[in-house]
Amino acid sequence: MNMLKTFGILAIALCLAGTTLRAHQVTFKGTVVSVEKTSVKITVLDEKTKKPVQKSFDFDKETKILRGDKLVSIEQARIVKGDKISVTIDHDVDETLAIVIRLDPKATGE
């Protein structure tokens, strides 16, 4: 009986640990307003007010940048004002650091 109790406690602990290790990712979809060397400002629709708001996100060498389905560098992405964009962050780590930036397959300026 004691072994069963220990196993039950261990099972609960593993379940709780798995829950805390899982990332709380949030994706924002919108349109590029501006882009800097290490950040991008986009317009998104606020879920509560249903009005457009601007949000800024930072990116670094760890950020995955996709143009369509192709993984590209920030230089290759050629992000321009008006591009459709989605930015995924890990809400539990940093609310402004992009972990994934996804853009339409073809740049607006092309």
Image (tube, rainbow, N blue to C red):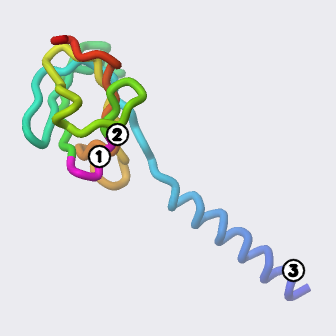
| The disc label shown at residue 4, or none | 3
Q: Residue at x 37, y 53 (%)?
A: 92
Q: Residue furthest right?
A: 1
Place residue 83 in its image quadrant.
top left
Mark 1: few, some, or many residues within 10 Å (few <14, many ≥20)? some
Q: Residue furthest bottom?
A: 2
Residue 46 shows up from this direction: no
Q: Residue at x 45, y 47 (%)?
A: 24
CA gap between label 2 and label 3 equals 43 Å
- Which residue lies under the disc numbered 2? 100
Q: Position of residue 22 (x, y in %)?
A: 52, 55
* Residue range highlighted in magenta: 60-64
Residue 50 located left or right of residue 37: right
Q: Residue at x 11, y 30 (%)?
A: 35
Q: Disc 2 vs disc 1: Cβ atoms closer than 8 Å?
A: yes
Q: Position of residue 87 (x, y in %)?
A: 31, 33
- Which residue lies under the disc numbered 1? 63
